[in-house]
């Protein structure tokens, strides 16, 4: 993922204000990556959490729903807390 700069490319797409499809795509990609990489994906949670939180506030319902789906289906709340708050 580092070799192809996946996270930064998805971040750039998520910041596209002109196309809701471009903003929805990264959240769907994060869902696929979390299901594919399983526990290896925990390393990337700190990088994608701000992107997902921004998606929750998006003006388009499809983007908000996709962000919610990633958190409820692909990522466990406990993993987020452990990655963000290791104490």
Image (cartoon, helix red, strand yellow):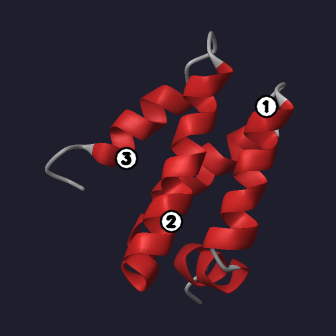
Q: Examine the rendered structure and indicate whether residue 72 appears above or below residue 7.
A: below
Q: Residue 5 falls in which quadrant of the image?
A: top left
Which residue in the protein does label 3 denote? Answer: 7
Q: Secondary structure at mark 2?
A: helix
Q: From the image, tell me which residue sits under label 2.
A: 45
Q: Residue at x 86, y 34 (%)?
A: 61
Residue 46 seen in the figure? no
Q: Secondary structure at mark 3?
A: helix
Q: Earlier in the sequence, mark 3 or mark 2?
A: 3
Closest to the observer, 25 or 7: 25
Along the viewing direction, whichever of 62 and 18 lies nearer the viewer: 62
Residue 48 horizontal/vertical position (percent) = 52, 54
> Is 50 on the left or on the right of 58, as rendered?
left
| Quadrant assignment for the N terminus | bottom left
Q: Seen in the image, is 8 located left or right of residue 81?
A: left
In the rendered image, residue 26, in percent from the top left (x then y), is placed at: 52, 41
Residue 34 percent coordinates (x, y): 49, 69
Residue found 55% across the figure and 25% down from its top = 22
Q: Is residue 38 above or below residue 23?
A: below
Q: Is residue 63 visible?
A: yes
At x 62%, y 73%, the residue is: 75
Q: Could you give the CA–CA distance between mark 3 and mark 1, rounded to whole angstroms? A: 19 Å
Which residue occupies 77% across, 56% down?
68
State the image coordinates of residue 7 (x, y, percent, origin top left).
37, 47
Res 41 label: none
Distance (Cα) linking label 3 and label 2: 10 Å
Spatial CA span between label 2 and label 1: 20 Å
Q: Which residue matches tag 1?
A: 58
- Secondary-structure class at tag 1: loop
């Amino acid at each position: 993922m580092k070799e192809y700069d996946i996270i930064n490319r998805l971040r750039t797409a998520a910041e596209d204000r002109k196309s809701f499809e471009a903003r929805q795509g990264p959240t769907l990609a994060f869902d696929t990556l979390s299901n594919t990489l399983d526990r290896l994906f925990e390393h990337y949670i700190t990088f994608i959490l701000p992107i997902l939180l921004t998606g929750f506030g998006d003006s388009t319902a499809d983007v908000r729903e996709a962000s919610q789906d990633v958190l409820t289906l692909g990522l466990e709340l406990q993993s987020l807390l452990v990655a963000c708050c290791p104490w």
